[in-house]
Amino acid sequence: MNLLQSVFLGIVQGLTEFLPVSSSGHLVLMQHFLKLETGGDVAFEVFLHLGTLLAVLIYFRKLIFDLAISLFRWKDSPQNQAHRYNRALIMYIAVATLGTGIVYLIFGNIFEALYDRPLIVSIMLLVTGAIVFASDYMKGGSIPSVSMGLVRSFIIGLVQGLAIIPGISRSGSTIGASLFAGLKRKDAASFSFLLSIPAILAANLREFSALASLQPAQILIYLAGFMAAFGVAWLVISLLIGMVQRGNLKYFAFYCWAIGLLGIVLLAS
């Protein structure tokens, strides 16, 4: 892999990790129709995921810092109400992550087997388009994320677990589920991004050991992909939050429908 390829793949990773278009669905269809082998370099994939993760951590750095501080402020007083809200949000993130983990433990092997079924993946892209399109026409809810409750957070986590299915967008499904649950639009977007932190970490935890095998000559090339993924993901976070607030996600729905239908037509011909 050369420097230009690393940057290109980093840009693709930064775009598809958070936009509601399903990076896994694109991966399956690219491999099938273009006969590409995009996997195999585990260390590079970890680098790219760390780039998108860093973008979330820095973009939400103030909120994440406040959440961390609230874990150590337990004195009951009116001034500490914000800390109680923050601890509630941490609990809801944990509960949602638990829901995602349960789905993975029960259905993970079944869903991952669909990576060899491009027709199913194309159909799932149509489903993603429907979810994203419908979420645009949901009236803005009034529930802040700090008051969503255990049931809503668990259901959102279960929906995130369904994004193991290639073709189902993680961000699209969690934002849609949050809006359907009555969350405020901005809170639905930010909660989806916060949920991505444990999701990305869990998905790559077992692969971190691959970083130890890196050769010095590879580090510069890998860092280029890392920085490209980080920079693009940073821009995508801001873009997506604004689009959720304005109800402009429908454009991604049209894109998912186009790719899904194209895949079905090509597979049927």
Image (cartoon, helix red, strand yellow):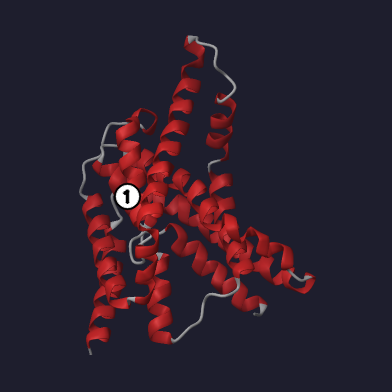
Quick check: 217 above or below 90?
below
Answer left or right for 196 relative to 150.
Answer: right
Residue at point 32% right, 50% down?
A: 159
User: Residue pushed farthest right?
Assistant: 216
| Viewer-proximal residue among 140 and 21 | 21
Q: Quadrant of residue 49?
A: bottom right
Instruction: Tell me which amino acid carries mark 1.
Output: Val
Name the spot of residue 183 as percent of width and height, x first.
30, 37
Quick check: 193 above or below 256?
above
Identify the residue under disc 1.
159
The N terminus, quarter of image: bottom right
Residue 257 visible in image: yes
Answer left or right for 5 relative to 264.
Answer: right
Residue at point 45% right, 37% down?
A: 94
| Viewer-proximal residue among 134 and 43 | 43
Q: Quadrant of residue 31?
A: bottom left
Residue 51 visible in image: no
Name the spot of residue 249 as percent of width and height, x first.
30, 56
The C terminus, quarter of image: bottom left
